[in-house]
Image: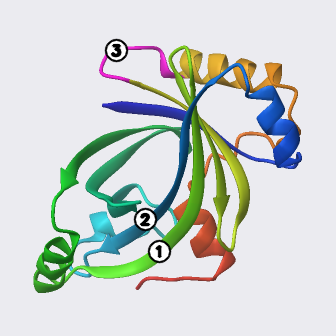
Amino acid sequence: MKEIEVLVEVYDDVKNIKKKFKKFNYKGLKRTIDEYYYDPKRSELKPNKNSGLDHCLRLRTKNDEYSITYKDDVFDNGKWLYSNEYETKVENIEMVREIFKRLGLIKFIEIDNKKETYTYNDYEIVIEGVKDLGLFMEVEYCTDDDVDVKEVKNDIQKFIDSLKIKVSDELNIGKPEMYMKKHNIKID
């Protein structure tokens, strides 16, 4: 599935944002912990020289639900466009951690955040308070269809602009990469 999204940092007050989101369908608040793993024997699952993750393996805990995800990113002239995401639910996350350990995979980042999720038309809108990083908004469109990704991202940006919320420009970097840079995490 193509995961096409725009991630921005939020500079506005959360109360102001929630007022503007009243017209959206509220899906709830969930604490999410994302654990990112790399394989010391495969360069594909290691961060690149710029601390970017072109491919990543993630275990997610969202309240009492667990999932495993493999993502590979698609770039245009070095700029991130979207991710192909392969995700499935996991019944026993401790067993998956043990399997990873026995395969020699190493956990190198843990992202802890609180996500308030809304939907509006074909978009999922998430306000994320990320521990040690800040407040972000992610607007996502997922599809299996062959779409013009640049056009979809442009539409998402227009939608964000229409909200009249104080935000950064699109970050074009994921939270794991931001976390690695902020905390100077390097993988050999």
Indicate the secondary structure of the residue bearing disc 2: strand
Q: To which residue does mark 2 refer? A: 34
Q: What amino acid does circle 3 point to? A: Asp
Sooner in the amino-acid sequence: mark 2 or mark 1: 2
Sooner in the amino-acid sequence: mark 1 or mark 3: 1
Tell me which segment is drawn in magenta: 143-149
Question: Label 3: few (<14), some or many (≥20) within 10 Å?
Answer: few
Between residues 122 and 106, which one lies in front from this camera angle?
A: 122
Indicate the secondary structure of the residue bearing disc 3: loop
Q: Is residue 31 left or right of residue 88?
A: right
Circles 2 and 1 in contact, beta carbons < 8 Å:
yes
Which one is in front in this view, the residue at disc 3 or the one at disc 2? 2
Q: To which residue does mark 3 refer? A: 146
Note whether residue 180 is visible: yes
Q: Position of residue 160 (x, y in %)?
A: 74, 26
> In which quadrant will I find the C terminus?
bottom left
Per the model, the C-alpha gap separating discs 3 and 2 is 29 Å
Give the quarter of the image for residue 37. bottom left
Q: Position of residue 14 (x, y in %)?
A: 82, 47
Between residues 2 and 23, which one lies in front from this camera angle?
A: 23
Give the quarter of the image for residue 142. top left
Question: Label 1: few (<14), some or many (≥20) within 10 Å?
Answer: some
Q: What amino acid does circle 1 point to? A: Glu
Give the vertical position of 36 relative to 27 (above or below).
below
Q: Residue at x 63, y 65 (%)?
A: 178
Q: To which residue does mark 1 refer? A: 110
Q: Position of residue 71 (x, y in %)?
A: 33, 49
Between residues 60 and 74, which one lies in front from this camera angle?
A: 60
Based on the picture, tell me whether residue 144 belongs to the magenta stretch. Answer: yes
Q: What amino acid does circle 2 point to? A: Asp
The rendered magenta stretch, by its main secondary structure, is classed as loop
Give the vertical position of 64 relative to 73 (above or below).
below
